[in-house]
Image: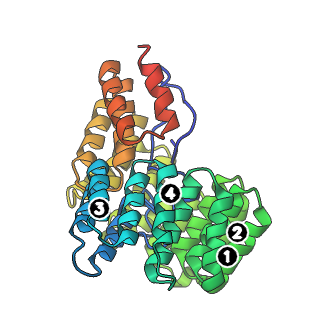
């Protein structure tokens, strides 16, 4: 399994790896204003849009901008771009319209145009630094990161921290950018500063661990988690203990704690609980955990995606396909790219290469910068 674009793995016809979520682990918190604590959709793009969409309500006469944000929330990026262009033509707030265009391009994984749009939005500023300007800068840095330009992302975070030196989000994200620049010492200094500012932010501690793990510094990441357990275990909820144990590889302790927490922790607790059982190889019980949650709540696409991944591990490709497709029925969910990709992989494992090729063509029309998907499409055309 993987979090973002990677290499091929074995399987029928050389099927590509499944996706747990869109984007890489190292970039999972590109904006601090997205939902935190999720183990399957941390830092997701669509949720950030939902939070940021409130900014379009400033002032009157911005109908096309608001309309564009609705299209973005519904993942209809082409219509969103048309609305934002019309907003600009009608003289609406150019900063918000260009920001919206950047969000739409981000959703399309067109990071070059996204950065251009965010820069245009910043150029429309009056000179007084407002909250929306910080918001745009965070998105700009995220686009730079996704475009493979960690140095430019770092420069943006430097500018934010010059004005807000204790901004925990910017410190964490600059540390992330430093890791992309292979500057471990500077990254660790930023991560240490984040912990110094708020050592009880267990969501953030886990994110620091995941970034370090992604770049090959798992043992260093574990020191942050172990330090938190040593200092605050008595103050932690069963859910927090469970996910700490999970990331430390102590899966039995994890699922024992998460069994206790599942009735209080919602989807997050069930995701960690199921993944703890998956880590022990008990895929049948793990799938029962996800299905049990879905009898109570069918609105979380992450559960469907994780269920599908679990069914794939069991070799139950039809059930996996059904899970991915059920998740795709949830409007405005932040897992759509991963679900669509995993749907295609399911069809490959089922031997339906024609259907997979058609879906991949549609997928690439929405996500044209997914290089792995493009390589896979070339493979499918030979079947």
Which residue is denoted by mark 2 in the rendering? 223
Q: Is residue 124 left or right of residue 27?
A: left
**Which sits in the foreground, 86 or 215?**
86
The residues bearing labels 2 and 1 have C-alpha atoms spaced at a distance of 6 Å
Residue matched to label 1: 227
**Which of the two labelled residues, at mark 3 and mark 4, occupies the earlier sequence position?**
3
Quarter of image, res 238:
bottom left
Q: Is residue 369 above or below residue 253?
A: above
Label number found at residue 89: 3
Give the mark, 3 or 1, whose residue is nearer the N terminus.
3
Task: Return the x and y of residue 57 as percentages of the image width and height.
Answer: 27, 77
- Count neighbours of disc 4 (C-alpha within 10 A) and say few if under 14, some if 14 to 19, many if 20 or more: some
Say which element carries label 4.
helix
Q: Which mark is residue 116?
A: 4
Q: Residues within 10 Å of mark 3 (few under 14, many from 20)?
A: few
Q: Quadrant of the rendered structure where residue 163 is?
A: bottom right
Q: Position of residue 348 (x, y in %)?
A: 38, 25
CB contact under 8 Å: marks 3 and 2: no
């Amino acid at each position: 399994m993987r979090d973002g674009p990677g290499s091929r793995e074995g399987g029928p016809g050389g099927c590509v790896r499944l996706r747990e979520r869109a984007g890489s682990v190292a970039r999972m918190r590109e904006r601090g204003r997205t939902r935190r604590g999720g183990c399957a959709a941390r830092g997701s793009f669509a949720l950030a849009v939902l939070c940021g969409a409130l900014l379009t309500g400033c002032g009157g006469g911005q109908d096309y901008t608001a309309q564009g944000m609705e299209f973005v929330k519904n993942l209809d990026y082409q219509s969103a771009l048309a609305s934002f262009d019309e907003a600009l033509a009608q003289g609406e707030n150019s900063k918000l319209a260009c920001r919206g265009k950047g969000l739409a391009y981000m959703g399309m994984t067109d990071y070059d145009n996204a950065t251009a749009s965010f820069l245009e939005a910043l150029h429309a500023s009056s000179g007084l630094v407002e909250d929306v300007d910080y918001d745009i800068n965070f998105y700009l840095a995220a686009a730079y990161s996704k475009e493979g330009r960690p140095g430019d992302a770092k420069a943006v975070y430097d500018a934010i921290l010059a004005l807000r030196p204790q901004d925990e989000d910017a410190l964490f994200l600059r540390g992330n950018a430093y890791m992309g620049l292979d500057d471990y010492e500077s990254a660790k200094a930023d991560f240490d500063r984040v912990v110094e500012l708020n050592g009880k932010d267990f969501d953030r501690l886990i994110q620091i661990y995941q970034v370090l793990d992604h770049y090959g510094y798992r043992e260093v990441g574990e020191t942050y988690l172990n330090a938190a357990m040593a200092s605050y275990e008595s103050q932690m909820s069963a859910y927090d203990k469970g996910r700490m144990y999970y990331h430390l590889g102590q899966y039995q302790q994890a699922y024992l704690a998460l069994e206790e927490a599942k009735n209080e922790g919602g989807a997050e607790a069930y995701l960690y609980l199921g993944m703890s059982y998956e880590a022990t190889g008990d895929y049948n019980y793990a799938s029962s955990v996800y299905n049990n949650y879905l009898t109570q709540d069918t609105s979380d696409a992450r559960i469907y995606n994780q269920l599908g991944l679990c069914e794939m591990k069991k070799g139950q490709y039809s059930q996996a396909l059904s899970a991915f497709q059920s998740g795709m029925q949830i409007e405005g969910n932040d897992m759509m790219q991963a679900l669509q990709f995993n749907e295609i992989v399911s069809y490959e494992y089922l031997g339906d290469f024609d259907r997979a090729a058609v879906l991949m063509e549609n997928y690439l029309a929405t996500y044209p910068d997914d290089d792995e998907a493009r390589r896979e499409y070339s493979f499918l055309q030979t079947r």
